[in-house]
Amino acid sequence: MNSQKPAAFLLLGGVVAACLVGPLRAELIVNHNLGPLPFGSTNVTGDTSTGANNADIYAGITNPAFNWGNEVIYSFSLSSPSSLVIAANALAGDPDFFLLNSLATGRPGLKNEALGAIKSPAYLDTQRVFNFGALSPGTYYLSVDSFIGADGGIVPGDAAFDVDLHVFPYSPAPAPTAVNLGRIAGLGEPIEIDTLVADFDTELALYDSIGAALRFNDDDERAAAFQSALRFEGGLPLGEYFIAVGGFDAVFEDAFVAVPGDESGNYALAYNGGVVNGFLDPAEIQYYRFTVGIPEPSSIILLGWAVVPVCCARRRRKLNTDTNG
Ligand SMILES: [Ca+2]
Ligand SMILES: [Ca+2]
Ligand SMILES: [Ca+2]
């Protein structure tokens, strides 16, 4: 009689689950959970030989021609806006330190890509102290990965490290005036933002809601003439984000600080199927805002109301039948 009901529930469940968790992907492995990082200093000591190599490169922030070997991954959380500084006490081999906001990795290929890299890496090769900068409250991962060279010149080897993580309070910066793009993805859904169609040399940066500069791109490898793209194939944490569009040679820093470049002209900002046309004046930065969220509240409410009355109506009818019967 009601053969469509289980199918409808399965479909609904699938849609909701897909919207909430996104497509399934392989994930990096957390070796140690540091828990909530308090303000002050936390010592982290380890050896990459105790880890595994699930990330050869870090998408969007490392040169694809380079290779990293075994990595050890630490998870930690921040309960309030913070800035994070890493300082080396002792290093052996060539450990590099990557901050990630997800454990997602790319599809199997020639190289394994960690997709959740944010900020610039701390190489700690000459400078023994590095400021990762501002971070919103949330969960992060520190991947300590052993640098093993460029393609064709790999020297396998592990690295040992003794570093301190210094956490300081950070005051969120006021949001800039921005064109609102609305919700462009759900949790775990791939995000791509680009200005590949532009008549000048563009640059792009991504900020989170407190002004933490997360990712920057000058030239995408697909660009015809030095245009930019930001790709988060593993998605972004739920929240509000800001895109800054600039011309070469802009500089982007925390607190929504952006020093404009000289280049200007027409561009099309493409984002997950949408597109906005703009014109950038000389010495100008333009901002757009978007959210990564669960499905629009209106659609959840609609789904909820579509299901609940049917369930209740059936139960009530059965109860009535039993009671009367
Ligand atoms: Ca690795
Ligand atoms: Ca290094
Ligand atoms: Ca560029």
Image (tube, rainbow, N blue to C red):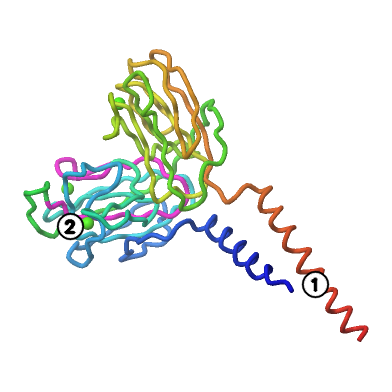
Q: State if disc 1 and disc 2 touch (CB < 8 Å).
A: no
Mark 2 C-beta to ligand 1 under 8 Å: yes
Q: Determine which residue is flagged by label 1.
A: 314
Q: Residue at x 49, y 33 (%)?
A: 173
Q: Determine which residue is flagged by label 2.
A: 69
Indicate the quadrant where residue 70 lies.
bottom left
| Nearer-the-camera pick, 139 or 102 | 102
Q: Would you say 86 lies left or right of 238 here?
A: left
| Nearer-the-camera pick, 91 or 152 | 152
Q: Residue at x 35, y 44 (%)?
A: 118
Rendered-image quarter of ligand 1: bottom left
| Nearer-the-camera pick, 256 or 198 | 198
Q: Position of residue 312 (x, y in %)?
A: 79, 69
**Most prominent secondary structure in the magenta stretch?**
strand
> Is residue 271 found inside the magenta-colored segment of the image?
no
Of the 4 image quadrants, the one containing the N terminus is bottom right
Q: Secondary structure at mark 1?
A: helix
Q: Would you say 24 lies left or right of 65 here?
A: right
Q: On screen, 293 above or below 320?
A: above
The residues colored magenta run: 121-148
